[in-house]
Amino acid sequence: MQSVKEEVVCFYLGGYGDFDNIALRACKKYKESHPTVRIVFVTPYLSQRYLKNREVVLKRYDEVVFPEIENVLPRFAILKRNEWMVKKADFVIAYVNYGWGGAANTLAYAFKQKKPFLNLGQKVF
């Protein structure tokens, strides 16, 4: 049986907000003892901010992915990006305390998709 140390594991991160920063630090710490881990930033759009900070982003993550959501209006891009990440994920980790907002919508989507998940917050589904 293959151990996690030998298996390629991808962590998909949104890169925005406090939880994403905490998650990035946790993933980097995990990667120290699991060298096959890939930390992937999934950007919802190629904004001027991203393009300006591209080199910084590339230093923080192993890879940057722009999912095939280019026909989505910008105000729905993060929602669609989050749905894309849920579809790709084998397991979802979230921090949701309330039944509203982007994180809650994403966790509800994971629940509907029957994805196994761990919510580090207080909201119960």
Image (cartoon, rainbow, N blue to C red):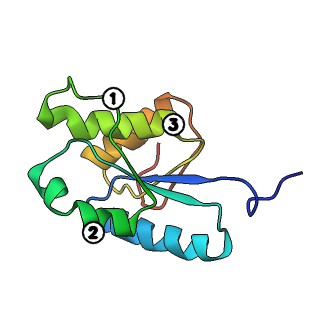
Q: Is residue 17 visible?
A: no
Q: Is 81 situated left or right of 38 in this image?
A: left
How far is disc 1 from disc 3 in space, using C-alphas? 13 Å
| Of the pair 101 and 33, the residue shown nearer to us | 33
Q: Position of residue 83 (x, y in %)?
A: 38, 34
Which residue position holds label 1? 68
Q: Position of residue 108 (x, y in %)?
A: 41, 37
Asked whether the beta carbons under mark 1 and mark 3 sit within 8 Å of each other, the answer is no
Q: Residue at x 74, y 64 (%)?
A: 5
**Labels 2, 3: front one:** 2
How far is disc 2 from disc 3 in space, using C-alphas? 25 Å
Mark 2 belongs to which amino acid?
Answer: Val
Callout 2 environment at 10 Å: few (<14), some (14 to 19), or many (20+)?
few
35 relative to 97, above or below: below
Which residue position holds label 3? 88
| Of the pair 116 and 59, the residue shown nearer to us | 59
Residue farthest top in this picture: 71
108 relative to 53, above or below: above
Which residue position holds label 2? 56
Q: Which one is earlier in the sequence, the residue at label 1 or at label 2?
A: 2
Mark 1 belongs to which amino acid?
Answer: Glu
Q: Which one is earlier in the sequence, the residue at label 2 or at label 3?
A: 2
**Labels 1, 3: front one:** 1
Callout 3 environment at 10 Å: few (<14), some (14 to 19), or many (20+)?
few
Q: What is the quadrant of residue 74 in the picture? A: top left
